[in-house]
Amino acid sequence: MGRSGYSNEYVFRAAIQNFGGIICNDPSEAVYMTAMNGEDHLHLSGEKKYCIHFDEKTIPPVNEFWSLSMYGIDHNFVDNPINKYAIGDRTPNIKKNKDGSFDIYIQHEYPDADKEENWLPCPAKEFYMILRAYDPDKSIIEQTWIPPTINVVQ
């Protein structure tokens, strides 16, 4: 859809961008996956704590990079005390487990000190996240790759 303007379909492209944002990429360029619920099938909320476990099967298969961004229900980044709005494969100092996997902690309050590098702060109430995959593998485009579960910790 990002190349609709090349085929003189400017009205179609404008409509897509109106609903989807300023940039509308082709799936071969980027795929955006929105998460609004945790494993409990309830809306994500800062009243709970979440953990997302990434291992060799659940790390997004991309040729460029991936990121997980936090948004409030107003569709804006969530203001937070550490000015961290996304986390991904380019985030410095991610703590890895002994097997090379890692966990991302989603919660409103500061986590324990040993988890702070892997913390993505969320608002006190409802929010959603977008997992972005740039230059994604065919498995993402064809929807055979399954993103990791957003586990409710508390």
Image (cartoon, grey):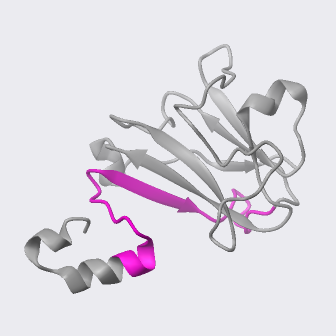
Check residue 36 for magenta coloring. Answer: yes
**Can you say whether 127 is above or below 80 in the image?**
below
**Can you say whether 83 is above or below 4 in the image?**
above
Residue 5 pos. (x, y %): 17, 73
Residue 6 pos. (x, y %): 12, 69
**Can you say whether 118 is above or below 26 in the image?**
above
Determine the residue positioned at 69% across, 33% down: 103
Q: How many marks?
A: 0
The quarter holding residue 134 reads top left
- Range shown magenta: 17-45
The N terminus - image quarter? bottom left
Q: Nearer the viewer, residue 73 or 148?
A: 73
Residue 7 pos. (x, y %): 9, 73
Q: Nearer the viewer, residue 8 or 53?
A: 8
Tell me: 139 left or right of 111: left
The quarter holding residue 10 reads bottom left
